[in-house]
Image (cartoon, rainbow, N blue to C red):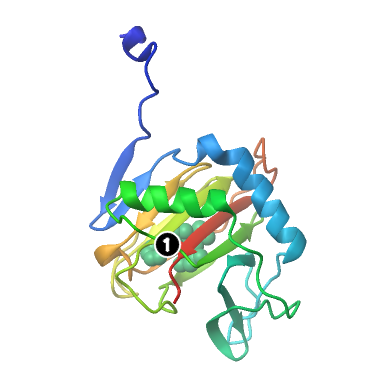
């Protein structure tokens, strides 16, 4: 039994179907962790993480930046995708090849061949930061999935239904996990509970989440 994989490729990462349209590829990003972390640092050097303000006037506890042809932004005026970083007046950093390739491969493995994201929202959580229950509705085509990559400290993800009042499940998202949200899961309510403190060997007291979108 120990020798089952001797001389062969390692087993594929575990696939969990967590709901119709929602596929969790545990550990799928682990082989790319160094390249992903370096790419996030390069993005943040050009477009620093910032705490955006939601239309109601509250400051988000997660810090955000973007890469790609479009970036998700919020301010007192509302939520939108914008080709320009409002903090710098310059375009968002280009999407790194490792991001596009990994998101496309994960989407294909989950049943969405040809996924070509034009936007990547990068969320950074410090201990205590959270993301309250919401839906992602600023994209043009809801037949396109969203692909998420979790790095650093683990988080408790809340996954609900089509209505805010629907019951939610709690799912642990850990370093290296990739999830693909398509079909009926695409418009489900979801959120992240307040991040528990801890120390991650690669990222310290931090969680980073990449969400790949086809915004336009
Ligand atoms: C289910 N991010 O950026 S990733 C977001 O961990 C966002 O930072 C969370 O929700 C994070 O909008 C959750 C998992 C995720 C992302 C997008 C989804 C789940 C989703 C879109 C539709 C349904
Ligand atoms: Fe979301």
Image quadrant occupied by the C terminus: bottom left
- Where is residue 113, by image quadrant? bottom left
Relative to residue 70, is residue 53 drawn left or right?
A: right
Element under disc 1: loop
- Where is residue 213, by image quadrant? bottom left
Ligand 1: give its quadrant: bottom left
Q: Pinpoint residue 38: horizontal percent, then vertical percent.
A: 68, 46
Q: Nearest the camera: 24 or 190?
A: 24
Question: Crowding near pointer 1: few (<14 within 10 Å), some, many (20+)?
Answer: some
Can residue 130 be seen from the camera position used here?
no
Q: Is residue 187 above or below residue 126?
A: below
Read off the residue under disc 1. Answer: 116
Q: Nearest the camera: 136 or 142?
A: 142
Q: Give the residue displayed 38% in from the left and 60% down from the top.
A: 115
Q: Pinpoint residue 2: horizontal percent, then vertical percent.
A: 36, 9
Q: Is residue 110 above or below residue 182?
A: above
Q: Pinpoint residue 84: horizontal percent, then vertical percent.
A: 65, 79
Image quadrant occupied by the N terminus: top left
Relative to residue 169, is residue 87 drawn left or right?
A: right
Q: Nearest the camera: 9 or 64?
A: 9
């Amino acid at each position: 039994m120990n020798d089952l994989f001797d001389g062969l490729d390692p087993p594929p990462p575990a696939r969990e179907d967590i709901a119709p349209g929602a596929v969790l590829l545990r550990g799928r990003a682990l082989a790319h962790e160094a390249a992903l972390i370096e790419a996030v640092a390069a993005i943040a050097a050009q477009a620093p993480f910032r705490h955006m303000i939601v239309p109601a006037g509250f400051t988000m506890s997660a810090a955000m930046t973007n890469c790609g042809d479009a970036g998700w932004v919020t301010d007192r005026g509302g939520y939108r995708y914008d080709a320009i970083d409002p903090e710098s007046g310059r375009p968002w950093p280009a999407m790194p090849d490792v991001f596009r390739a990994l998101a496309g491969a994960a989407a294909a493995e989950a049943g969405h061949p040809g996924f070509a994201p034009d936007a990547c929202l990068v969320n950074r959580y410090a201990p205590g930061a959270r993301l309250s229950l919401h839906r992602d509705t600023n994209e043009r085509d809801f037949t396109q999935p969203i692909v998420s990559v979790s790095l650093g400290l683990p988080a408790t993800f809340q996954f609900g239904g089509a209505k805010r009042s629907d019951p939610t499940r709690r799912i642990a998202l850990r370093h290296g996990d990739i999830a693909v949200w398509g079909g009926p899961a695409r418009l489900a309510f979801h959120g992240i509970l307040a991040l528990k403190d801890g120390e991650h060997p690669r990222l310290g007291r931090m969680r980073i989440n990449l969400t790949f979108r086809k915004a336009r």
